[in-house]
C-alpha cells in the first residue's frame, strides 16, 4: 500500500471512530433529565411539547443547539466539527454544578495529564506563538471573534468559554530580538469535572485551529483538526 492510500485508510478509520463516539454520546443523553443538566451546566433547555426539548449550549461566542429526542445538532459553520459535537454532548451529560474556580492549571496538572502534556507545545502552543507572537494586537482581533475575554497575564491573554463551565486561558508573551515568543494554554481547575483530560486536549486543539483560521492559516488548521476530528 502506498503512503497516500495508507493515509486515506488511517483517516477513514479515525473518522469512523469519531462517528461511533458521536453516536454513543447521543445515546448517553437518552433518559437524562435535560432540564436538570441545564441547571448544573449553565445552559438552557426549552420544553417544546410532546416530549421534545431544545438544548442551547454557548460555545466560543456561538450557540450549539441540540434537539432531543431527534438528536439534531446545529451550530455556526465556522465552529462546526464532529469533535465539538461529541464534546458538547459529553458536556451536557457530565454537567455537575461545580462552579468555575478561577484557578488556572497546566494540562500536566489535570488528572492523568502528565503523560500527554508534552504534546501540547509542538501542536498547539508553539504554532500559536509563531503566528501571533510578533504581531502585536493580532491575537486581540482573533480572540474577539471567539468571545475571548481579556485577562491580566503575559503580554496578551484571553479567556475563551468553550462551554459555560469549561473556560480556557491563552497566555501570549511577545517575541523580540532577544527572546522568541511563548504561548501557554491553561485550564480552570473545574474543567476536569465536566470533560475528561483527553477531551480537554481536543478542546484546546479546536481553539488553536480556530485561531489559525483567523490568521489565514486554513491548511494548518485543517491538518490540526484532522488529528482530532
Image: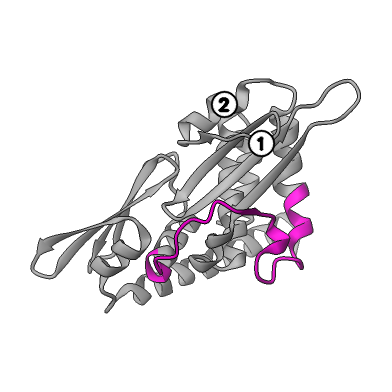
Q: Give the colour scheme of this rendering.
A: one colour
Residue at 76%, 56% (x, y): give it. Answer: 119
**x and y percent of residue 87 in the render?**
47, 61
The residue furthest bottom is: 31
Residue 228 makes an appearance in the image: no
Badge nearest the viewer, 2 or 1:
1
- The vertical placement of 208 against 94, above or below, is above
Q: Disc 1 marks which residue?
A: 153
- As helix, strand or loop, the secondary structure at mark 1 comes to loop
Image quadrant occupied by the N terminus: bottom right
Q: Disc 2 marks which residue?
A: 140
The residue furthest left is: 50
Residue range corresponding to the magenta coloring: 92-121
Residue 115 within the segment the image draws in magenta: yes
Mark number displayed over residue 78: none
**x and y percent of residue 93 in the render?**
38, 70
**In the displayed structure image, the side of residue 42 where residue 182 appears, left or right:** right
Q: Earlier in the sequence, mark 2 or mark 1?
A: 2
**x and y percent of residue 172 in the render?**
70, 34
- The vertical placement of 184 against 66, above or below, is above
**In the displayed structure image, the side of residue 3 where residue 17 appears, left or right:** left
- The 10 Å Cα crowd at callout 2, few under 14, some 14 to 19, many 20 or more, is some
Residue at 65%, 46% (x, y): give it. Answer: 223
- The 10 Å Cα crowd at callout 1, few under 14, some 14 to 19, many 20 or more, is few
Amino acid at each position: 500500500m502506498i503512503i497516500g492510500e495508507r493515509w486515506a485508510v488511517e483517516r477513514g478509520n479515525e473518522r469512523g471512530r469519531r462517528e461511533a463516539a458521536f453516536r454513543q454520546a447521543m445515546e448517553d443523553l437518552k433518559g437524562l433529565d435535560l432540564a436538570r443538566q441545564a441547571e448544573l451546566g449553565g445552559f438552557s433547555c426549552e420544553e417544546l411539547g410532546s416530549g421534545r426539548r431544545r438544548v442551547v449550549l454557548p460555545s466560543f461566542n456561538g450557540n450549539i443547539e441540540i434537539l432531543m429526542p431527534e438528536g439534531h445538532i446545529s451550530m455556526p459553520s465556522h465552529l462546526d466539527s464532529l469533535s465539538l459535537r461529541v464534546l458538547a454532548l459529553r458536556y451536557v451529560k457530565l454537567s455537575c454544578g461545580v462552579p468555575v474556580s478561577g484557578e488556572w492549571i497546566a494540562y500536566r496538572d489535570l488528572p492523568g495529564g502528565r503523560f500527554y502534556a508534552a504534546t501540547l507545545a509542538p501542536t498547539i502552543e508553539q504554532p500559536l506563538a509563531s503566528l501571533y507572537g510578533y504581531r502585536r494586537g493580532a491575537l486581540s482581533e482573533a480572540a474577539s471573534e471567539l468571545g475571548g475575554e481579556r485577562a491580566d497575564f503575559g503580554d496578551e491573554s484571553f479567556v475563551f468559554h468553550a462551554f459555560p463551565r469549561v473556560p480556557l486561558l491563552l497566555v501570549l508573551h511577545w517575541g523580540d530580538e532577544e527572546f522568541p515568543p511563548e504561548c501557554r494554554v491553561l485550564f480552570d481547575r473545574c474543567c476536569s469535572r465536566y470533560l475528561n483530560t483527553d477531551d480537554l486536549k481536543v478542546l484546546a486543539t479546536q481553539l488553536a485551529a480556530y485561531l489559525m483560521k483567523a490568521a489565514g492559516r486554513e491548511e494548518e488548521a485543517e491538518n490540526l483538526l484532522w488529528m482530532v476530528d
